[in-house]
Image (cartoon, helix red, strand yellow):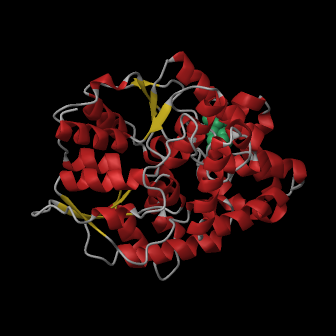
Amino acid sequence: MGGPGLPCVHCGLCLDTCPTYRVLGTEADSPRGRIYIMEGIRDGELEFDDEAALHLSRCLGCLACESACPSGVSFGRRIEEFRPRLAERTGSTRRWQDLARKAYTSDALVDAGVKVASLLDRAGLGGVRRKVPGLGLLPGSLPGSQPSSSAGVSPLRRSTSHQPLRARARVAVLTGCVADRVLPDINRDTVEVLQRNGIEVVEVAGQQCCGALALHAGLTSDAVELAAANANALAGSDIDFVVTTAAGCSAMLRDYAHVLAGTSAAGRGEELASMSRDICELLVEIGFDAPARPLEARGNVAFHDACHLLHAQGISSAPRRVCEVALGRAPVDLGENAICCGSAGSYNIDHPVLSAEIGARKAELARERKATVVAVANVGCMLQIGQAVALAGLPTLVKHPVQLLAEAYRRSDTGA
Ligand code: SF4
Ligand code: SF4
């Protein structure tokens, strides 16, 4: 088989890592089956009909198959090239496109969704709304929802008054589109942790959504436009690093050289890719203080890997290290850590039943581990696992590692 990268040798070693194959058990919903479909369509041997589009659209883009493949097959590039054709072909994706366009450009829409979710939860309808695609993921007031103490307030604007006098580095935080509105405490805690460790946080005007949601929805020209705006705004400013708290965003920034290839922003895209860091990765790279009083009594904390850190960027030890320092002991693994939770941007909207089935496995694992907290370094996974544990009736909280570290610093300050 041809296409981007090396050919698939049909060994099947990737099958068990694929969440859709694990749930559905059908070859066409496996990495090997999808490669067969894409190559068949490309070579004119298969028709690009509704069935083929369904199997391809069920791919989460988690890249677990790439990590598992001993032949180095580049699955991600193959499916990425197919997404625009999928977007044209499938009605469900067109609906998502419309929603995505509005969601990632409209703070008001995200804020309204968060308010509706909280109202339904308070009216005793939380179980019902948790099953509504899109709305079900939003934090409300159910266990696992992580209601924000500061929703709707830009964490950067509230926090940049505590800059270190002699900064070790200057960073900009890519605040993210949905993340900054849905779970703003993560960005607030990120700024606090950076500043406590002698790092100056600067606001850079003109930053946008990273474009990953658009790329996943097959809206390539929108993704390129957003990437170019970020490259021109961030790579041209006087900073050492660009930090993100969402794995999908840092993976996207690191891919800007590819996304912007052949455009006038290609050079800046390459520069920005080299400056991009996940927050935990940066903390471990330049060093950070241990809290005087770690959160030893936080209960049973189970760590889950975010696919776009583990598979897309090869980052696994840094978020575990941040958790370990915050807790004063290493977290346990949730289990099946290399398997996606079923989040993946629009997936909850396009494939709500399958997404929920994949997510339910994470709730089962949280129950088996008796986890009081699931730590995961990506907002999409936090929302997805938060939804799964809420639907399972578990009291488990879902936290970003940087939230645990900020909490440990604050407890150390108060001696609580
Ligand atoms: S990217 Fe994930 S969902 Fe898609 S084929 Fe590979 S393992 Fe399966
Ligand atoms: S592991 Fe790699 S070579 Fe083997 S079936 Fe999967 S994609 Fe093909």
Residue 336 lies, with reference to residue 347, above or below; the image says above
Residue in view at x 29 percent, y 61 percent: 159
Is 22 left, or right, of 399 in this rendering? right
Is 12 left, or right, of 48 in this rendering? left
Q: Nearer the viewer, residue 18 or 303?
A: 303
Residue 392 lies, with reference to residue 30, above or below; the image says above
Residue in view at x 59 percent, y 29 percent: 362
Q: Residue furthest bottom?
A: 264
The quadrant of the rendered image in which ligand 1 is seen is top right
Q: Nearer the viewer, residue 350 or 24?
A: 350
Residue 114 lies, with reference to residue 258, above or below; the image says above
Confirm whether residue 292 shows in the render. yes
Q: Position of residue 177 (x, y in %)?
A: 52, 63
Residue 264 lies, with reference to residue 156, above or below; the image says below
Location of residue 365 by image quarter: top right
Q: Position of residue 98 (x, y in %)?
A: 73, 67
Count of labels shown? Answer: 0
Q: Position of residue 232 (x, y in %)?
A: 41, 79
Q: Position of residue 89 (x, y in %)?
A: 83, 62
Q: Residue furthest front?
A: 123
The C terminus lies in which quarter of the figure?
top left
Confirm whether residue 9 shows in the render. no
Residue in view at x 25 percent, y 27 percent: 328
Is 201 left, or right, of 365 in this rendering? left
Is 142 left, or right, of 219 in this rendering? left
